[in-house]
Image (cartoon, coloured by chain):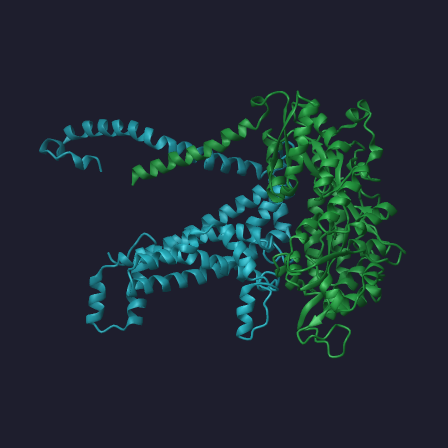
Amino acid sequence: MNLSRRTLLKAGLGALAVPAVAACNNGAAARGDGEIIYWLWDSAQLPMYTECAKVFHEQNPQYTVKIEQYGWNDYWSKLVTGFISDTAPDVFTGHSSKYPLFADKGQVLPIDDYVAKDNVDLSIYQKGLADRWIGADGKRYGLPKDWDTEVYFYNSALTEAAGISTEQLNSMTWNPKDGGTFEQIVQRLTVDSKGRRGDQPGFDKSNVKVYGLGYADAGGGDGQTSWSWYAASNGWKYSEGEPWGTKFFYGDPKFTETIGWWRGLITKGYMPTYAQAKSGVDVTTSFGAGKYAITPNGSWMLGTYGELKQVKTKLARLPIGPVGKRMSMMNGLADTIWAGTTRRDASWAWVKFLGSQTAQDIVAKAGVVFPAVAASMPAAKAAFAKSGWDVTPFLEPVEAGDVFPYPANPNAADVTAVMTPAMDAVMSFEAEPGSLAKANRDVNKILSANA
Amino acid sequence: MTTTNAPPTRKRSHGDSAAPPRKRRNLGDLKVAMIFIAPATLGFVVFYIWPTLRGAYLSFTEYSLLSAPKFNGLANYERMVQDSFFWNALGVTVEYVVINIGVQTVLAVGIAMLMYRLTKSITVRAVILAPYLVANVVVALVWYWMLDVQVGVVQTFLGWVGIDPVAFFGDSHWAIPTVAGINVWRHMGYTALLVFAGLQTIPKYVYEAAEVDGSTEWKTFWRITLPLLRPVLVMVLVVTMIGSFQIFDTVAVTTQGGPINATRVIYYYIYERAFTRFDFGYASAMALVLFAILAVVSLLQLRLLRAKESDLA
């Protein structure tokens, strides 16, 4: 008994020591001067970046890049522990919801000097993208690598069965009063268990087989893939002085009437109840099982939708809202340098390379994301066309300039902690849209306390 | 233990002459003992004592992980009293523990009794233990899929018996019972085995006596089995309850605190505060309060249920 316990303990201590030692090796001392570590979270992009690292090494033989990939959830906690223990990667993929806090805490390196010294041409990127990486303090923290917008992904077998044409789907209008032609289409696409459509007499809204519109969640504070384009095309904006909001407007009638209309689709039976929506594994799985006719989503989900073999998925434009145009959120990723790196020059060389057309052409050809460099876009479009996607609806708002940024904020996590339960409560009819005014006050209190 | 190895001599068992060699002998053991417990002590100090002390210190600071901790006295504790999320988290956790431990203990005792009375088969024991061998996260994910309101297989079964789909994870009233149920499913076999081991310590003669006296099965269970099982049952209760208070992974992979705040259990809230909101000082303060609660609950259980005494004596 004693013996086995001791052995166990030794083995346990040994096992604990191994990753500790391994973690130390991740540190700067053990590596060659030209070797940098780069992190990303999307496994689908690993092959392209491995390819980029190869080309980078050929162009700069003095530098090598070691790529490590961790899933989205592990990624951020690992990164933060890396910051604290001085073992963070030299360069890592950043997200606009996360980097403002890191910048605020001095963990990411401003690259203004490098950009000026090497005369980096920032006009090669899609309009407005490079500026997303200028923090609240006016310093630049990254070079953009890709971007995303939102559209409707629809099940074409269901729209054909409903007699709705591609033209109709691509010329939808929306308003918060009656939902416009968008709501009519969603209504028609909803089918109850007896096969009656939402616009047919006798439609039984408590026994719906196919919902016209699906949604993943209540959207929290950003509503990126749930309500952001309705609110924006209703003339609403997140905050004063976007994107570095100091005062938010979640209590604005333009916002609350949008949310009121949106959750009204649940009452009408065109959208599942919040409980049902949240009880699903995820919205794409339900869409793939033919339970939803339309689901809004971001361009990064193209690969996932492409893998749904039971349904034929096509893309439709967002609706034209009261402001007279279509609006989409445009967000993107960038490569950022850890402030604690001992290999600043090598890190910058890699960031600069990833931001160049050479690297982005490699990324574009894989057809996984949209490259940030405008000239690389045709290659990406062709790659997506090869896998059967006409990605025009994603590009149009960008070309027209009708896009708005992700509501970035150094206190994003605290804002989310208030807005997620508040939106959940409204969507599950446990609170009225008017209650968002109180949530808005809480959000503004957090911002003024941390200002 | 070691002293019994030496045959007692008259000389040693009487008077002062016995004392000095014994003392020396004990000290000699101490050296060896130190060597043997050193690895364990090192692990205990490095991985338990030190983090606990540091956590206690951090609970009196404002610490955002990315900049040095700043001492702020009792501010975190004051905040906690006013934080409605904290009280909600405690309430949700207690609801979870009551459902989880209540159902699990009753089922475990039931299963253990069945095993004890009906079969001693190793295969049956292995099957009963099987869910416990699957990783928590995997269990949670598989159940999440099976309970999916749109495509879950459980909903199909419910449909056969005429029950409408139930939004197990999405409905705020169902979420905690669902999470508790999943963990009951995973842990009841293991708990049953512990109880089963306890049952085997009850001497056969008490049952024989009961039978002679004409006791019914039901009466035997309440009057003999349960009272004699009490010390084991208390141990099982204390251990499972501490584990139950620390519910985290099932919530983290399924509801993540939602819908609304229905499953934001205390551990998940601590984690959120510490690692997504970088409010490490406040999170440490909550962890310390949880530690105190668990210590008090465990002590109360041990005291009230007289864990040290057995009715056999």
- Of B269 and A59, nearer the camera is A59
Instruction: Kindly indicate which chain is depicted in green in the rendered structure.
Output: A
Residue B164 drawn above or below residue B140: below
State whether residue B304 appears in this view: no
The residue shown at (22%, 69%) is B210
Question: Farthest residue in the front direction?
Answer: A386
The spot of residue A88 in percent (x, y) is 62, 31
Instruction: Kindly indicate which chain is depicted in cyan in the rendered structure.
Output: B
State whether residue A127 appears in this view: yes
Quarter of the rendering occupied by the C terminus of chain A = top right
Quarter of the rendering occupied by the N terminus of chain A = top left
* B252 on left or right of B117: right
Identify the image quadrant of residue A147. top right
The spot of residue A333 in percent (x, y) is 73, 40
- Of A410 and A38, nearer the camera is A38
Question: Farthest residue in the left direction?
Answer: B10
The spot of residue A63 in percent (x, y) is 66, 23
* B235 on left or right of B9: right
The residue shown at (64%, 50%) is B82
The spot of residue A177 in percent (x, y) is 84, 65
The residue shown at (22%, 38%) is B1
Residue B205 drawn above or below residue A12: below
